[in-house]
């Protein structure tokens, strides 16, 4: 037994040394690439933690392309990121994260656009001649994410490091300003432009939205005229699947009763939930849109939204379309999962703790009251989203790359 324990301890010690050596060698590798790679004044690299072409970085990148600004646009992708014209514009060059080419591109970029402390995660410390723009990936979020709500010390160290490196951070509201100042961006200059990712939700170009709607329906074989309800909850650390048990058949019935028409239910689960979710839990006519890269585009075409604690519902509010919260585990969630900025009851959306309440909330939905409540909520939080955030951000980046 003593020999066995010695062998195990010895192996553990050996593995610890190997990991430390690997960490040091990678750090040296990144450092050498950085110091021997000159900065290209026209290059902008986008770091999106999902690797997909979505979120605020997409809005900014689209803004640069649409404005016709001269720039070399590089997008960081993951090994499973789907490429091609359906997912990336021709003007964008994809580069695989953590590859040699990635660190060359990162080291030579004049502007780095990040939406979730990716720069710190890849252990890159920017040069003095580089600009780091943080966009974050939430909006008037429900869940807290800073020191008061996160016990992951490694993540907190990385967030603090990113905060020290950030030159500008983009905000869409007074509330978000306060959140940034509370934790990691206490002195970082704030670009109060609105969120570029939300421009599509306020788009007045009916032809653009119609084309998007047709594209999504074609991809998922949904007939024209059928109304769309999307259920997109957040994840649970305890992997309990019970909070996701909506009665989909009843849901379609009450949607028809209250709003008329034929309905299709779309589901979009968090990437951390999809790993252990059992798809046989759902009726065959429920459509999984989890593989669609941009939730904002889905939000732009759906007729009703349902979530629990996910911040997307606060962005969906900009459309003033019916929305509902379904939270069967509110007390447990706030005590053991995530601390909330405010109770769900503070949102304009009717809240349900079980299926019966959800169905009743839909049947009793008061559109006039809902719109007034949305207006009051957005005004109280100091929201400034107006559909032109991408233009503002793109213009500021143009100034940086042409300075």
Image (spheres, rainbow, N blue to C red):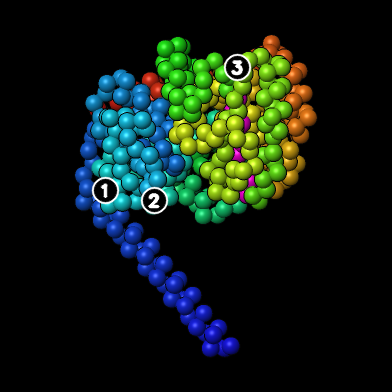
Q: Nearer the viewer, residue 194 or 265?
A: 265
Q: Residues within 10 Å of mark 1 (few under 14, many from 20)?
A: few
What count of labels does the image hold? 3
- Mark 1 secondary-structure assignment: helix
Q: Is residue 247 above or below residue 24?
A: above
Q: Could you tell me which quadrant the N terminus lies in?
A: bottom right
User: Is residue 236 within the magenta segment?
Assistant: yes
Q: Residue at x 55, y 54 (%)?
A: 153
Residue pointed to by mark 2: 122
Q: Closer to the camera: disc 2 or disc 3?
A: 3
Q: Nearer the viewer, residue 174 or 300?
A: 300
Q: Residue at x 59, y 25 (%)?
A: 264
Q: Nearer the viewer, residue 155 or 189?
A: 155
Q: Could you tell me how far apart the alpha carbons at marks 3 and 1 are, in whole angstroms?
A: 44 Å
Q: Residues within 10 Å of mark 2 (few under 14, many from 20)?
A: some
Give the magenta-colored segment's residue range.
229-237
Q: Residue at x 67, y 25 (%)?
A: 252
User: Is residue 154 within the magenta segment?
Assistant: no
Q: Position of residue 58 (x, y in %)?
A: 40, 30
Residue pointed to by mark 3: 320
Residue pointed to by mark 1: 101
Q: Closer to the camera: disc 1 or disc 2?
A: 1
């Amino acid at each position: 037994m003593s020999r066995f324990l010695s062998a195990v301890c010895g192996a553990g010690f050996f593995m610890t040394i190997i990991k430390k050596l690997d960490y040091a060698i990678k750090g040296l590798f990144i450092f050498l690439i950085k110091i021997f790679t000159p900065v290209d004044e026209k290059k902008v690299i986008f770091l999106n933690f999902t690797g997909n072409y979505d979120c605020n970085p997409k809005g900014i990148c689209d803004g640069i392309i649409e404005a016709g600004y001269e720039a070399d646009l590089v997008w960081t992708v993951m090994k499973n990121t789907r490429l091609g014209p359906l997912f990336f514009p021709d003007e964008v060059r994809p580069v695989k994260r953590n590859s040699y080419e990635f660190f060359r591109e990162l080291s030579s970029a004049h502007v780095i656009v990040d939406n979730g402390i990716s720069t710190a995660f890849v252990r890159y410390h920017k040069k003095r001649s580089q600009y780091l723009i943080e966009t974050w990936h939430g909006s008037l979020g429900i869940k807290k994410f800073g020191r008061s709500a996160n016990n992951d010390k490694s993540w907190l160290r990385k967030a603090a490091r990113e905060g020290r490196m950030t030159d500008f951070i983009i905000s869409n509201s007074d509330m978000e300003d306060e959140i940034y100042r509370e934790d990691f961006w206490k002195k970082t200059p704030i670009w109060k432009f609105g969120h570029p990712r939300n421009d599509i939700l306020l788009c007045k170009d009916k032809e653009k939205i119609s084309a998007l709607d047709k594209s999504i329906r074609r991809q998922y074989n949904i007939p024209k005229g059928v109304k769309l309800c999307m259920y997109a909850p957040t994840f649970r650390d305890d992997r309990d699947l019970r909070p996701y048990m909506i009665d989909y058949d009843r849901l379609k019935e009450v949607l028809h009763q209250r709003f008329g028409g034929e309905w299709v239910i779309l589901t979009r689960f968090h990437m951390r939930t999809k790993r252990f979710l059992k798809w046989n839990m759902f009726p065959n006519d429920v459509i999984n849109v989890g593989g669609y890269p941009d939730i904002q585009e889905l939000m732009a075409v759906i007729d009703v939204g349902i979530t629990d604690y996910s911040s997307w519902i606060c962005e969906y509010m900009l459309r003033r379309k019916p929305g509902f919260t379904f939270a069967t585990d509110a007390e447990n969630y706030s005590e053991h999962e995530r601390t909330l900025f405010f109770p769900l009851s503070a949102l304009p959306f009717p809240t349900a703790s079980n299926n019966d309440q959800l169905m009743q909330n839909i049947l009793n939905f008061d559109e006039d009251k809902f719109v007034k409540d949305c207006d009051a909520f957005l005004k109280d939080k100091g929201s400034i989203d107006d559909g032109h955030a991408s233009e503002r951000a793109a213009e500021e980046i143009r100034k940086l790359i042409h300075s």
